[in-house]
Amino acid sequence: MRAPHPVVVVHGGAGDVPVERHAEAVEGCRRAARAGLEVLLAGGSALDAAQRAVEVLEDDPLFNAGTGACLTEAGEIELDASVMEGTGLRAGAVAALPPFRNPVRIARAVLEEGRHVMMSGPGAAAFARSMGFEPADPESMITEASRRRLETWKQGRAEAGWAGGTVGAVACDASGRLAAATSTGGRVGKRPGRVGDSPVPGAGTFADDEAGACSCTGDGEAILRVGLARLAVDLLRVGLHADEAARAAIATLGRRVGGTGGLVLLDRRGRFAACWNTRTMSHAVARAGQPVVGDIVAPLQDV
């Protein structure tokens, strides 16, 4: 087996982004992938790199995570995020978290403390404060675009062209360690307290050094029902190439539950794939010694 090359793969949400926004969505993913790779090249772990890449996406109001996240039917932000590392299968997650910047950092704190895997709602907020994280002013994280999307939803019209999905990253370091991280604002107009796939290990996020790492985006209820991230990694485990596993997992999502979405996937050799059954999914790949590449309509893959 070839030695793994440090690599970070990110996605910015599956959906239907209009052509005029393609370039900025791809560039946002490139920035995130580049930031993750810089962590690896400085000696950081795969988990550090995946977390850093997602932080960059959370800070970009173009995406539905952190700042710029979509709003509940009550007009509020509730955030889901998770991280998982593949060596010890440790995971940390927060769900229905009120406004805190970079919820992926709080998910990492859950993992590091090790007492629980997931914290939710007011309990997650209390945990975050106990770990030194400061709540954010909601107005500093809610964008005008998010308000417009909620108004459109209230009028019974889905906003054409908005990805509306999760962001995420998978990473492999030079030691072959794997990790995944995922973050989202969820669905526009969701009921307060709704939890999607993103904070659930095996659904929206999964990593196992013995097989692979995956981060998912899309219809959270459907992704939860098929356990999409674990499904994709288990297909790697039985010998499928990363591209074959990604395509088979997304096909299952559509065939079994009529779900739409996408994923990015890494195998234990650091080979990657991206697949989706929506019109677009912005994504990018950063690998040591190579240009950072991205796309939104054509999947990148490592053959």
Image (cartoon, grey):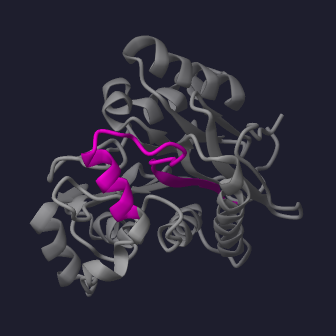
In the image, 97 versus 71, the foreground residue is 71
Q: Please tell me whether residue 169 belongs to the stretch shown in magenta.
A: yes
Residue 146 appears in which quarter of the rendering? bottom left
Residue drawn at x 34%, y 72% as measured from the top left: 142
Decide if residue 298 is in sight here: yes
Residue drawn at x 21%, y 62% as measured from the top left: 75
Relative to 192, 52 lies left or right: right
Residue drawn at x 44%, y 58% as measured from the top left: 64
Residue 5 picture location, percent across and down:
78, 55
In the image, 30 versus 148, the foreground residue is 148
In the image, 254 versus 200, the foreground residue is 254
Residue 219 picture location, percent across and down:
39, 35
> Which quadrant of the rendered structure holds the N terminus?
top right
Relative to 117, 213 lies left or right: right
* Segment colored magenta: 146-173
Residue drawn at x 38%, y 37% as measured from the top left: 202
Residue 213 picture location, percent across and down:
55, 44
Residue 271 appears in which quarter of the rendering? top right
